[in-house]
Image (cartoon, rainbow, N blue to C red):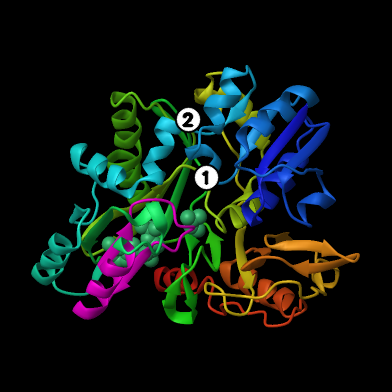
């Protein structure tokens, strides 16, 4: 069958890499992709958000299945448009994608259905927001309502910073996305990502993982889209997972169905696990980036078969098989990211790094210019490794990272450390 992957990042490279391995797939296409994905899939030169052009392409080319990576096309109705045209697609419809596209919706939804989340209020004007900040004290968390590429959340440590952030957001820092904001209580603890494939009221868990959102080691500095991830995440013990399913995942599916917003696709709960229990920081209606990269390295069964079974209403039959190895993905980013950065620097050393069969390098912001592989985004690559232990996976991944070069490359050196510490404590 012909499969189309929609999206341009490391997540999409990992999905395409896995989909390509399926014996069901004869031809793989990507819209628009990156230099890594173009090595394994045919490039379709259409933007992931140009829904009408994608529908036309899929009809003309006879695409049998489309898998959507990022949130933007989902929240713009790509699934609704494909379904109306009688095309098979995996992802949430627009009315369900709102769970990620609006943090105000997500918070009010969680409150209504008793899903644990930080105490909050929503605001559309500065004066009330400032009063709330004064009442709550700091640290405090301020979130733009709409999509902001993972950058719409500010943790303010002083009242001045909090008020400045509110002014900035209402002043249009994220355009329409920050016309409304959520202000919420700061939660302590360890973060983890819980992702499942869902259909209606049923779900199939993916392997657990942990992202590293802040740009610098030790979780310092501003938030990014994610600087690295590993799987499984030892903070999600069997008991923690039981609670996540019972108190968060199933109530979310039932609640969304009750609201007339039935879900089908990937559902991602970003969690804070700490003294206040397990709380939802955010929902995403897609796989995480970079979590997908280490997760796909551990999936042994056929992702395409799983997706087809879910679309055909057979989610109860879906039983993914996971490798019992650990995997780690380290993001190599452009100088300046998550702020301003330059593009166009040559990337070398990937082949050398991939000589180790346990290493796979997924591209994110890459392009080909004058026949050379060059940087073309903030997050450039995710280098992944597998190992029998988390520590071994970490050692391998950093040996590989050191072989890859581009001007100004930066990356965190502590991806996996929280898991390694936790495992040693448990031993
Ligand atoms: P979000 O996009 O809502 O997941 O927020 C991005 C990041 O900000 C999270 O991954 C956390 O690192 C941090 N964060 C968000 N909300 C809170 C909170 N209530 N308490 C502490 N940290 C938070
Ligand atoms: N890695 C976090 C996200 O994909 O939202």
Q: Residue furthest front?
A: 171
Whether the residue carrying mark 1 lies under 8 Å from ligand 2 is answered with no
Magenta-colored stretch includes residue 150: yes
Q: Earlier in the sequence, mark 2 or mark 1?
A: 1
Local crowd at mark 1 within 10 Å, few (<14), some, or many (≥20)? some
Q: CA distance from mark 2 to mark 1?
A: 12 Å
- Toward the viewer: 164 or 304? 164
Q: Nearer the viewer, mark 2 or mark 1?
A: 1
User: Label 2 belongs to which residue?
Assistant: 93
- The secondary element bearing badge 2 is classed as loop
Q: Position of residue 408 (x, y in %)?
A: 68, 83
Q: Is residue 113 left or right of residue 215?
A: left
Q: Position of residue 189 (x, y in %)?
A: 30, 67
Circles 2 and 1: CB distance less than 8 Å?
no
State which region is magenta.
Answer: 141-169
Whether residue 209 is visible: no
User: Label 1 belongs to which residue?
Assistant: 72
Local crowd at mark 2 within 10 Å, few (<14), some, or many (≥20)? many
- Toward the viewer: 292 or 31? 31
């Amino acid at each position: 069958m012909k499969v189309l992957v929609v999206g341009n990042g490391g997540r999409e490279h990992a999905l395409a890499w896995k989909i390509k391995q399926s014996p069901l797939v004869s031809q793989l296409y990507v819209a628009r992709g990156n230099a890594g994905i173009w090595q394994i899939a045919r490039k379709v030169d259409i933007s992931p958000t140009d829904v009408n052009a994608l529908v036309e392409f899929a009809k003309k080319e006879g695409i049998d299945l489309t898998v959507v990576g990022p949130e933007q096309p989902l929240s713009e109705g790509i699934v609704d448009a494909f379904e109306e045209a009688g095309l098979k697609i995996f992802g949430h419809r627009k009315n369900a994608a709102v769970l990620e596209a609006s943090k105000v919706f997500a918070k009010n939804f969680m409150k209504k259905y008793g899903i644990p989340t930080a105490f909050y209020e929503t605001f559309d004007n500065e004066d009330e927001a400032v009063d709330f900040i004064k009442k709550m004290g700091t640290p405090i968390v301020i979130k733009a309502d709409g999509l902001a590429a993972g950058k719409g959340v500010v943790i303010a440590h002083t009242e001045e910073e909090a008020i400045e952030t509110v002014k900035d957001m209402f002043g249009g820092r994220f355009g329409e996305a920050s016309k409304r904001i959520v202000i919420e209580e700061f939660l302590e603890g360890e973060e983890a990502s819980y992702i499942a494939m869902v259909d209606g009221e049923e779900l199939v868990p993916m392997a657990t993982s942990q992202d590293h959102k802040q740009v610098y080691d030790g979780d310092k500095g501003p938030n990014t889209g994610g600087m690295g991830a590993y799987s499984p995440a030892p903070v999600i013990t069997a008991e923690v997972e039981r609670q996540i399913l019972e108190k968060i995942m199933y109530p979310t599916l039932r609640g969304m169905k009750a609201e007339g917003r039935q879900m089908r696709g990937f559902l991602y709960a970003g969690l804070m696990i700490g003294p206040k229990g397990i709380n939802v920081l955010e929902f995403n209606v897609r796989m995480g980036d970079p979590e997908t990269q280490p997760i796909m390295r551990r999936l042994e069964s056929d992702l395409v078969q799983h997706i087809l079974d879910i679309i055909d209403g057979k989610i109860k039959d879906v039983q993914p098989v996971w490798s019992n190895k650990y995997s780690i993905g380290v993001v190599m980013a452009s100088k300046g990211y998550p702020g301003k950065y330059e593009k166009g620097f040559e990337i070398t050393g990937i082949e050398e790094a991939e000589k180790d069969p346990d290493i796979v390098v997924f591209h994110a912001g890459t392009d080909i210019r004058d026949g050379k592989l060059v940087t073309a985004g903030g997050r450039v690559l995710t280098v992944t490794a597998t190992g029998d232990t988390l520590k071994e996976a970490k050692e391998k991944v950093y040996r590989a990272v050191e072989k890859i070069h581009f001007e100004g490359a930066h990356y965190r050196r502590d991806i996996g450390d929280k898991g390694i510490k936790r495992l040693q404590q448990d031993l």
